[in-house]
Image (spheres, grey):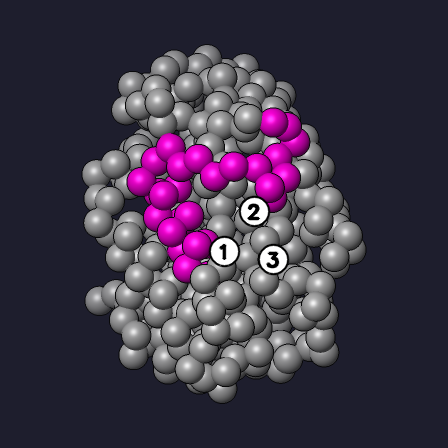
Amino acid sequence: MSLPLRVAVTGAEGFIGSHLTEALVTAGFRVRAMAQYNSFSSYGWLETLSPEVLDHVEIVLGDVRDPGSVNQLVEGADAVYHLAALIAIPYSYQAPHSYVDTNVTGTLNVLEAVRRLSVPRLVHTSTSETYGTAQTVPITEDHPISTQSPYAASKAGGDRLADSYHASFGTPVVTLRPFNTFGPRQSMRAVIPSVIGQVAAGERVITLGDLRPTRDFLYVKDTARAFLAVGTAPADAVVGRTFNAGTGGEISVGELTELIGKLMETELEVREDAQRIRPAASEVMRLVADATRLRTATGWSPEYDLEGGLRHTIDFFRDPANLARYKTGIYNV
């Protein structure tokens, strides 16, 4: 597929979305970026991008739950990257209706707009959480889906809609399923920025949840590259398919915390915080990716190892201007 000049991105103001927007511009695209409508007229992390990048970005405020907003975003686009979602697992226990509205109905709105406007390519975002605790490792795309939280269930619902639109209408959708992405701009709800942010703010007693689960952590620039890979690959190689994006490595939360302490040259004491622990049957204990399908179809492979990505993330949070954007002493679900 030749590089389209005009792309639309939902969820562009967020962690991965802002990095993807940068990567798209660097690759030569013009981007129409949707940020969630808000009364502050905030563009989220898009506001931190360089003027050179923003010269190629049209930012619009809208809501993926509203079909009109989505239609206006998508019209005239050569490709759509759909990243808008509610993603905090703990909050999905409190507000499951909101997760269905955004992650299922929002995805339906994007699929309908792409179908009606005959957009040549839609990249839909899934999550490794849809697999649940690994039954076999590494996890291939053929692993059973086992949703252990309302968040995971809502994302799986969006995935099924994407599959159904390809089967029913020939909608040119490809699904990317990133494993645990980390890096600069990530929310403090995630374990890596939580630990780094607490240490950067001067804390030496770190509060965390369960230290036993293992994850496959993928640096955000590699995740953005995976989106570009499936968004620009020949249609016959990717359309109608789902692709894992991960490193194939795994580390426990406890081991990860020790590694961060080592890289930050700080001795840490870890205390368990009950509000950070999922219900026992809802905790996904192990996730590790097999990304062979993505590598075979597109040539993608990660360029950053865990330590390299952590060092970049530590540098980000050690910048006082960046750290000031976070409330390191508060745990918001």
Q: Where in the figure is residue 91, as x and y percent of width and height?
A: 28, 40
Disc 1, SS: strand
Tell me the quadrant of the picture where the N terminus can be found.
Answer: bottom right
Q: Tell me which label, 1 or 2, sits earlier in the chain.
A: 1
Residue 44's quadrant in the figure? bottom left
Residue occupied by mark 2: 178
- Residue shown at the point (57%, 37%) measured from the top left: 143
- Is label 1 in contact with label 2 (beta carbons under 8 Å)? yes
Q: Residues within 10 Å of mark 1 (few under 14, many from 20)?
A: many
- Residue shown at the point (62%, 76%) measured from the top left: 29
- Front residue of this view, candidates 30 and 326: 30
- Is label 1 in contact with label 3 (beta carbons under 8 Å)? no
Residue occupied by mark 3: 241
Magenta span contains residue 69: no
As drawn, the label of residue 125 is: 1
- Residue shown at the point (47%, 18%) measured from the top left: 211
Instruction: State how far apart marks 1 and 3 are (Cα).
Output: 12 Å
Amino acid type of the residue that numbered disc 1 sits on in the rendered structure: Thr
Read off the magenta span: 136-162
- Front residue of this view, candidates 270 and 76: 76
In this picture, is 232 found above or below 284? below
